[in-house]
Amino acid sequence: MTQDYEQLRLHLAENIRLMRRVKNLTQEQLALMAEVDRTYVSQIERCTGNPSLMVLCKLANILEITTDQLLTESDTLRRALSIE
């Protein structure tokens, strides 16, 4: 269980960082749009924050992907969105 949890946290962190950069957003811009603190976005990207489902849904909507895509492997997300 712990390994699955840690792996999901890593995927989440990588995917948020990836999509934020694709959308050309800073952590602060993303945080303002999601109505969370900038440090919270930073914590999520560093795998130290544990976001609620509501925050995940907000982030996914802003990044224009589905919530479940946030938790997939980064390579899978890159292929699905044709990102290099």
Image: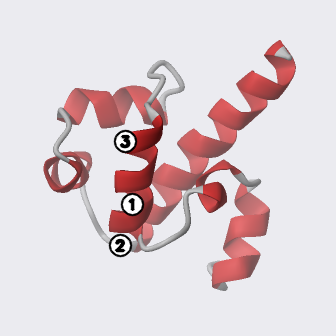
Is 2 placed above or below 83 here? Answer: above
- The Cα–Cα distance between marks 1 and 3, rounded to whole angstroms, is 15 Å
The amino acid on which the numbered mark 3 sits, given as a three-letter code, is: Val
Quadrant containing the C terminus is bottom right
- Residue position for label 2: 23
Q: Nearer the viewer, mark 1 or mark 3?
A: 3
Q: Amino acid at mark 1?
A: Arg
Q: Secondary structure at mark 1?
A: helix
Image coords of residue 24 (percent x, y)? 30, 70
Q: Quadrant of residue 80?
A: bottom right
Q: Which residue is mark 3?
A: 55
Residue at screen point 47% across, 51% down? 17
Q: Which residue is mark 1?
A: 20
User: With respect to residue 76, does 10 lie above or below?
Assistant: above
Left or right position of 79 against 33: right
Location of residue 73 by image quarter: bottom right
- Residue 37 at x, y percent in the picture: 18, 32
Left or right: residue 83 versus residue 65 is right
Distance from the alpha carbon under mark 2 to that under mark 3? 18 Å
Q: How many marks?
A: 3
Counting other residues with Cα less than 10 Å from the Cα at mark 1, is it few (<14), some (14-19), or many (20 or more)?
some
Q: Is there a contact, CB below 8 Å, between mark 2 and mark 1? A: yes
Question: Which residue type does callout 2 highlight?
Answer: Lys
Quarter of the image where the N terminus is located: top right
Q: Position of residue 16 (x, y in %)?
A: 48, 51
Q: Nearer the viewer, mark 2 or mark 3?
A: 3
Camera-side residue of 66 and 27: 66
Q: Which mark is first along the chain, 3 or 2?
A: 2
Q: Residue furthest bottom?
A: 82
